[in-house]
C-alpha cells in the first residue's frame, strides 16, 4: 500500500524506574532524514534506534523526540570541586581589594558558578534500552496506520484525476477521425476555389488524396494514444498494488504521460483536441504535486 509521508504519533510509558515520552513526526522528503532529540544518556543507542525506524519508514524527514525522567536518584552522586571553589574565592577576594568592594559571598554564589557542583551517574540504565525499543515499535505502528489513512485519501484524489485524464483521452480518440474529415472537406473546397474549371476528376481526387494523406501522416496520434493508455493502466496497477512500485516510479510514469500529451498537442490543429490535452496536462501536474507527499 502506498502511504503518505506525513504523520505524527506519541507514546507514554510509566514504570517503577522511568517516565518515558516519545514523539515521532514525519514530513515529506526525497530521502530518509533522521534526527533524534534526547538527552546525552542514550546517545550510544542512536544508530540502533535509527535502524529500527529505517526498517519501517524508508523516506521522509523524521524527528524522534525522547524524554526520560528517572524516578530514583540512587544511580547518581553529586561531586563537589573544592579546589575550583577555593580558586574562585581567592579570585573574588583579590578582585574586591582591587576595586575596594567588600565581598558578600554566600553558598548560593558558589553553587551558581559553573563546574563547582557536578552530577555524575554511577549506575547503568536498567532495562531502558528494551523499554525504548518496545515503545518505538508501538509508535511506528501508530504513525504508519495514520500514514496509510492519509495515503488512502490522497490515492482517491489521484484516481479521480486519472479518470479525468482517461475521459479526455477518449474524447481525443473520438475527435481525431473527425478532424481528418474536417481537413478533407476544407481541402476539397480550397482546391475547387483555386481551379474549378481545369481540374479533372481523377487529378482532383489524386491531389485531394495526397493532401489528406500528408495531413494524416503529420498529425497521426494513434501511437501516442496507445502509449498513453498503457501508461495509465501501468499507473493504476501500481496504485492498486497489483504490481510493485512507489511514488518515485509513479512520478516517472507521469512524466511519460505528460510527454505523450505534449506530442498530441503539438501535432494537432484541432482546438478541441488541444483543449483536452490541456486538461490532461493540468491533471498530470496535480497528480505529481500529490505524489510528493507519498512514499
Image: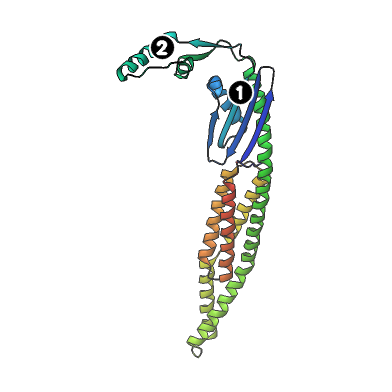
Q: Which residue does the image show at 66% across and 57% down from the upper left?
A: 163
Which of the 4 image quadrants contains residue 122?
A: top right
Where's residue 31, x and y in %? 53, 37
| Residue 28 visible in the picture | yes
- Describe the element under mark 1 as helix, strand or loop: strand
Q: In the image, 238: left or right of 85?
A: right
Which tag, 2 or 1, sits closer to the chain's start?
Answer: 1
For disc 2, the marked residue is: 84
| Residue 242 visible in the picture | no
**Is residue 16 or residue 164 the one in the foreground?**
16
- Describe the element under mark 2 as helix, strand or loop: helix
Q: Which residue does the image show at 64% across and 65% down from the upper left?
A: 171
Q: In the image, 251: left or right of 174?
A: left
Relative vertical location of residue 66 with respect to residue 163 in this rendering, above or below: above
Where's residue 80, x and y in %? 48, 10
For disc 1, the marked residue is: 68
Where's residue 125, x and y in %? 60, 15
Amino acid at each position: 500500500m502506498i502511504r503518505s509521508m506525513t504523520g505524527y504519533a506519541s507514546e507514554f510509558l510509566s514504570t517503577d524506574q522511568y517516565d518515558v515520552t516519545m514523539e515521532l513526526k514525519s514530513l515529506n522528503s526525497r530521502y530518509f532524514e533522521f534526527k533524534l532529540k534526547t538527552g546525552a544518556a542514550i546517545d550510544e543507542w542512536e544508530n540502533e534506534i535509527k535502524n529500527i525506524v529505517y526498517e519501517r519508514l524508508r523516506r521522509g524527514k523524521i524527528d524522534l523526540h525522547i524524554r526520560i525522567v528517572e524516578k530514583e536518584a540512587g544511580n547518581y552522586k553529586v561531586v563537589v570541586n573544592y579546589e575550583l571553589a577555593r580558586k574562585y574565592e581567592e579570585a573574588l577576594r583579590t578582585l574586591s581589594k582591587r576595586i575596594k568592594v567588600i565581598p558578600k559571598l554566600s553558598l548560593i554564589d558558589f553553587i551558581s558558578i559553573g563546574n563547582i557542583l557536578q552530577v555524575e551517574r554511577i549506575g547503568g540504565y536498567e532495562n531502558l534500552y528494551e523499554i525504548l525499543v518496545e515503545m518505538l515499535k508501538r509508535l511506528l505502528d501508530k504513525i504508519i496506520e495514520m500514514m496509510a489513512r492519509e495515503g488512502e485519501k490522497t490515492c482517491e484524489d489521484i484516481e479521480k484525476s486519472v479518470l479525468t485524464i482517461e475521459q479526455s483521452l477518449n474524447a481525443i480518440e473520438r475527435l481525431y477521425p473527425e478532424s481528418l474529415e474536417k481537413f478533407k472537406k476544407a481541402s476539397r473546397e480550397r482546391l475547387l476555389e483555386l481551379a474549378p474549371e481545369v481540374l479533372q476528376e481523377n487529378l482532383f481526387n489524386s491531389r485531394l488524396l495526397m493532401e489528406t494523406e500528408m495531413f494524416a501522416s503529420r498529425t497521426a496520434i494513434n501511437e501516442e494514444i496507445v502509449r498513453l493508455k498503457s501508461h495509465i493502466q501501468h499507473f493504476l496497477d501500481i496504485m492498486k498494488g497489483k504490481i510493485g512500485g512507489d511514488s518515485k516510479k509513479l512520478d516517472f510514469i507521469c512524466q511519460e504521460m505528460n510527454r505523450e500529451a505534449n506530442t498530441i498537442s503539438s501535432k494537432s490543429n484541432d482546438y478541441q483536441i488541444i483543449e483536452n490535452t490541456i486538461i490532461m496536462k493540468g491533471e498530470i501536474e496535480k497528480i505529481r504535486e500529490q505524489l510528493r507527499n507519498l512514499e
